[in-house]
Amino acid sequence: MENRLTVGFTHGDVNGIGYELIIKMMAENRICEVCTPVLFGSSKVAAYHRKALNIENFSLNSIQNARDANPKRCNIVNCVDDAIKVDLGQETPESDDAAVLALKAALTALDRNEIDVLVGAPQGCNSFKPAASCPVFFSERYETRNVMPLLVGEKMKMGFVTNHLPFRDIAGNITVNNIYYKLKLLDACLKKDFTIRKPRIAVLGLNPHSGENCMYGEEEKNVIIPAIERARDNGIMALGPYAPDGLFSGVEFEKFDVILAMYHDQGMIPFKTIEGNEGAVLLAGLPIVYTSTVHGMAYDITGQGIADESGMRNALYLAIDVYNNRQMNAELAQNPLRHYDIASNSNESDLNVEQIAGIEKEME
């Protein structure tokens, strides 16, 4: 009980399903056994949604500061004007403003160590303006160049070279450096945040059939393969490029710890097809732990009481796991075990080569 984390939640778009997800999840008695929950939002808006959803026997403990959170209650820090108008099922400038106000308040609390991790309810891309997207918003706030949304499900993890770009701009952003740095980020993230000692990364191609020997494009030969080779030269177990239709047609993708897609839909479609909306998103590359749901605001079902909170709950569990893994790995790094080379002629590079060769043989 003493080691429970204080978890911040943002209410997301007040006109979407965010409050429904949060209220359903917090209404479960066991949540206070897992963490001390603190919602950044509005008591009045929460009451509005609770009434609309006809949820009884649920209340929030209003506090001024996350440090005052009651570990036996679901707490709320009011950081949004209670006079905000709620228009269920519609994205409005007011709902975008309310979403980003709650996010900024929660991040301030996180930076002050008042909460340990942050879980965000869905909010629209417009709420992050003038930043182009959620990753850009966080990248600018924490002055971190490489920030990547990492989709996490039971069967797969999915990263991206490019994310929210118009399709016409994708090919121009597929460069050796961009791919290499994303591979480097994935490798570091899986080691630190998921305690995977030697992450196996599948890299997707860009063109149909991964170019088919340059018949359908040369990006694989001129860009993707050189990036993979550069990564391999630096100890990263990257393989590919693979054609998505082949990799996802069966269970071949399960042989890898993570998959690197070239663009948004190339990765998002197979992930959602296989994992549904129960997956969660970790923003990899940040000094803080921020997770959210894979799905969006779901305006079409807002207020109907049928939204599934599984993705929000999994985002909570993911945030806690990542925080604990980072703490554990930081402690291990301070007191490392002495390395013994049990095979006289082996080293890390040899082991990687053998494993890579084995996986490539399986994939043939």
Image (tube, rainbow, N blue to C red):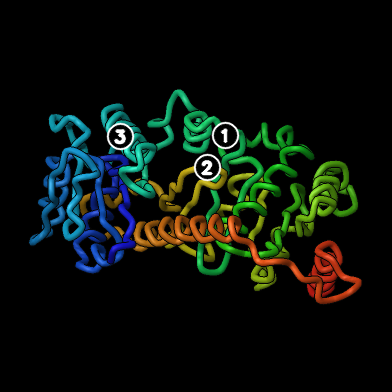
Q: What residue type is labelled 1?
A: Thr
Depth check, front residue: 146 or 277: 146
Image disc number at residue 105: 3
- Identify which residue is drawn at 21% across, 51% down: 303
Task: Give the mark nearer the N terminus: 3 vs 2.
Answer: 3
Q: What residue type is labelled 3?
A: Ala
> Is residue 96 at least partly visible in the picture?
yes
Instruction: Bin the neighbour count of mark 1 within 10 Å (Cα to Cα): few under 14, some 14-19, many 20 and up.
Output: few
Q: Distance between the residues labelled 3 and 2?
A: 18 Å
Instruction: Bin the neighbour count of mark 3 within 10 Å (Cα to Cα): few under 14, some 14-19, many 20 and up.
Output: some
Q: Mark 1 points at which residue?
A: 144
Task: Give the mark nearer the N terminus: 2 vs 1.
Answer: 1
Q: How far apart are marks 2 and 1 (CA)?
A: 7 Å
Q: In which quarter of the image is residue 342?
A: bottom right
Q: Mark 2 points at which residue?
A: 286
State the quadrant of the C terminus: bottom right
The reply to whether dot 2 and dot 1 touch (C-beta < 8 Å) is yes
Position of residue 141 measured from the top left corner of the image (x, y, whole percent): 47, 30
Depth check, front residue: 77 or 339: 339
Q: Distance between the residues labelled 3 and 1?
A: 20 Å
Mark 2 element type: loop
Q: In this view, does 169 lie above or below 265?
A: above
- Identify which residue is drawn at 30% across, 27% down: 93
- Identify which residue is drawn at 13% across, 44% down: 62
Q: In which quarter of the image is residue 63?
A: top left
Q: Relative to 170, is 58 on the left or the right?
A: left
